[in-house]
Image (spheres, rainbow, N blue to C red):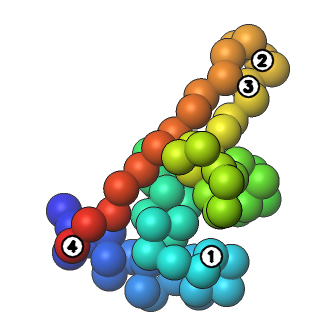
Amino acid sequence: MLDLIQREIAQDPYYRNNFDNDGQKFVAWYLRRVLLRDDAQTRDDITDGPNDKEIDAVIVDDVDERVVIIQGKFIT
């Protein structure tokens, strides 16, 4: 599975053009492939950066009235 994820990230310029590190790219992959977020939603959902309190993405779902908090680790 790790090979598939790394291959998809490497082959899709969306990740290279929008995210700085492997952790962000992995969370973006998860948002797009597992949670089925579109490109704009994925970019908006990512919160990773300095002082992020270890939260990498937040989804506010008004339809289902829920908040999804994602914290990912990408270790090879």
**Quadrant in the rendering for residue 18:** bottom right
Dot 4 or dot 1: first in sequence order is 1
Q: Is residue 3 among what the camera can see?
A: yes
Q: Relative to 56, does residue 15 appear above or below in the rendering? A: below
Residue 16 spot, x, y in % from top left:
58, 86
Circle 3/circle 2 CB separation < 8 Å: yes
Residue at the image point whose x is 60% and y is 44% from the top: 53
- Label 4 element class: loop
Task: Identify the residue position indicated by label 2 in the image.
Answer: 63
Is residue 54 found left or right of 17 in the rendered image? left
Q: Indicate left or right for 35 with 48 as reference.
A: left
User: Can you tell which of label 3 and label 2 is closer to the viewer?
Assistant: 3
Alpha carbons under labels 4 and 1: distance apart: 18 Å
- Residue beneath label 1, please? 19
Element type at mark 1 = loop
Residue 47 against residue 6 in the figure, above or below = above
Q: Which mark is residue 76?
A: 4
Mark in front: 3 vs 1:
1
Pick whichever of labels 3 and 1 is earlier in the sequence: 1
Camera-nearest label, 2 or 1: 1
Q: CA distance from mark 2 to mark 1?
A: 28 Å
Task: Quote the CA–CA distance across marks 3 and 2.
Answer: 6 Å
In what element is the residue under mark 2? loop
Residue at the image point whose x is 60% and y is 80% from the top: 20
The residue tagged 3 is: 61
Q: Quadrant of the C terminus?
A: bottom left
55 relative to 23 in the view: left or right: right
Where does the image place residue 50, in percent across and percent down from the top left? 66, 62
The residue type indicated by label 3 comes to: Asp
